[in-house]
Amino acid sequence: MKYAIAAAALGLLALGGCNRSNPDQLNEVETNQPAAEDLNALSDEAANVAAEAQALENQAEQLNREAQATDNAVGAVTPEDENIQGM
């Protein structure tokens, strides 16, 4: 009987340590969540990159239009022009 009471008391003590909150312990959610300021900074950076990409695309289109407008190359003028490797 004494052993049964002692075993029950020991079991209660062992289980008593469960589910106690530890203020020093971080939850997984807390460690993996970026701060709101970080998210705002990343959002601003993404918007800047997108604007820069759009500007570069516009510049490329303008350069292509200019290249097509100035492309005035004509065919070979002389037979030597046809065989450039012979030079």
Image (tube, helix red, strand yellow):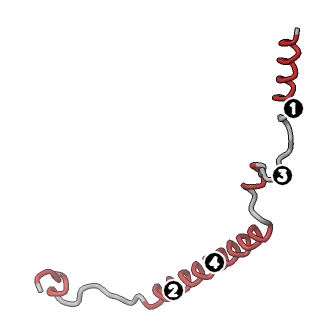
Tag 4: amino acid: Gln
Residue at point 83% right, 17% down?
A: 7
Of the 4 image quadrants, the one containing the N terminus is: top right
Residue at point 68% right, 75% down?
A: 45
Query: How packed is label 4: few (under 14 Cα within 10 Å), some, or many (20 or more)?
Result: few
Residue topped by disc 3: 23
Residue topped by disc 1: 16
Residue topped by disc 2: 63
Tag 2: amino acid: Leu
The residue positioned farthest toward the top in the image shown: 1
Question: How far apart in space, not on screen, are marks 4 and 1 (Cα)?
Answer: 62 Å
N-term mark: 4 or 1: 1
Tag 3: amino acid: Pro
Question: How far apart in space, not on screen, are marks 1 and 2 (Cα)?
Answer: 75 Å
N-term mark: 3 or 1: 1
What element does badge 1 sit on?
helix
Question: How far apart in space, not on screen, are marks 3 and 1 (Cα)?
Answer: 17 Å
Question: How far apart in space, not on screen, are marks 4 and 2 (Cα)?
Answer: 14 Å
Residue at point 28% right, 85% down?
A: 75
Residue topped by disc 4: 54
Q: Look at discs 1 and 2 and give the one toward the viewer.
A: 1
